[in-house]
Image: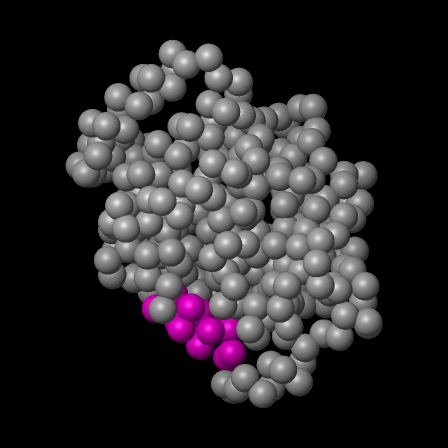
Amino acid sequence: MIANEENCRDNKIPASSNQLLSQGEHYIDVDGVKLWYLVRGEGPVLILYPSSAGWGGDCSVYIDYFKPWEEYRTVIYLEPRGLGKSERLNSASDYSMVKYVEELEHFRAKLGLEKFDLYGHCFAGMISLQYAIKYGQNLNHLIVMSTWPKLYPGYWEKWSVTRKGDDKMMKRFAEIANENLNGEEKLRENFKNMYAVMFYDYDKHKESFEKIMDSTVYSVLPNIQFGTVDHPNYNIVDSLKNITAKTFIIYGDDDVPMAIEGSKLIHEKIKNSKLLGIKKSSHWSFIEQPKIFFRETKNFLNQ
């Protein structure tokens, strides 16, 4: 059945019924860790899980660009452990994918949600898929974008040398390595530099995107855990068949090869899933082609 917008408004969650879902910023203790989250919009609950779990940034870029969903969903912008305003822990192992999945489930339970929609981009897509494998009964809809179900060694290196601006990127990486920056500053500069080749047309979005990146709060240990432990050992291909939630997989047709191939493989393995490649976009389709992205995701969420 296709739900119309009136149905969605009828199902909105009154703030007075659950103060944990009232509009604005919140802190909540989950597994002994103080987490920050922001609630905006009205309608059924959608948790927007940030890709920060892999790259170490806060959720600023999502808060800035995902306002269209707030028109028909109660969007929860969550900053998981160690990220943004949430509490930081002392060991890299505290930021494993397994712990992020369990934290998300305990966060859901703490909020008193029976079911919710879940969105994950890139690294967050990996955690969202693993959540859906283990706790799929709690999901109404799952949207993953520009993500992959296993490690694709060497794909980034072969792809990046073909990109406009690769020479400039490599030169800047060398400069960053020699600059007197602390860990978080270095992480910010490295990612800001790398993202320049991950747009279909970076010049068009450079000013607004870099403004967000410059104000993003970074955390080093989650990035270390992901890069040295979790990602090298990541492979959930055989478990994807266990996902029963309605699933929408999105990628940009100019995206990194592991996101394109990975998205197609995810679609192949999840029964009745929907796949969309968005033209003239790379890793940030919701920025480069927002009309298509938000139109198609709205149609999916209203099913």
| Image quadrant assignment for residue 167 | top left
Residue depicted at x 58% and y 30%: 219
Q: Nearer the viewer, residue 144 or 162?
A: 162
Q: Which residues are magenta?
A: 292-303
| Image quadrant assignment for residue 269 | bottom left
Left or right: 118 as drawn, with respect to 125: right
Q: Is residue 127 visible?
A: no
Residue 296 on the magenta segment: yes
The image shows residue 131 at horizontal and vertical percentages of 59, 53
Q: Is residue 26 visible?
A: yes
Residue 275 on the magenta segment: no
Q: 122 above or below 119?
A: above
Specify the color scheme: one colour
Q: Nearer the viewer, residue 295 or 130?
A: 295
Q: 198 above or below 260?
A: above
Residue depicted at x 81% and y 63%: 19
The image shows residue 53 at horizontal and vertical percentages of 55, 40
Q: 144 above or below 246?
A: above
The image shows residue 197 at horizontal and vertical percentages of 28, 39
Residue depicted at x 68% and y 77%: 12
Q: How many marks?
A: 0
Q: Nearer the viewer, residue 39 or 256?
A: 39
Residue depicted at x 33% and y 62%: 289
Secondary structure, magenta segment, majority class? helix
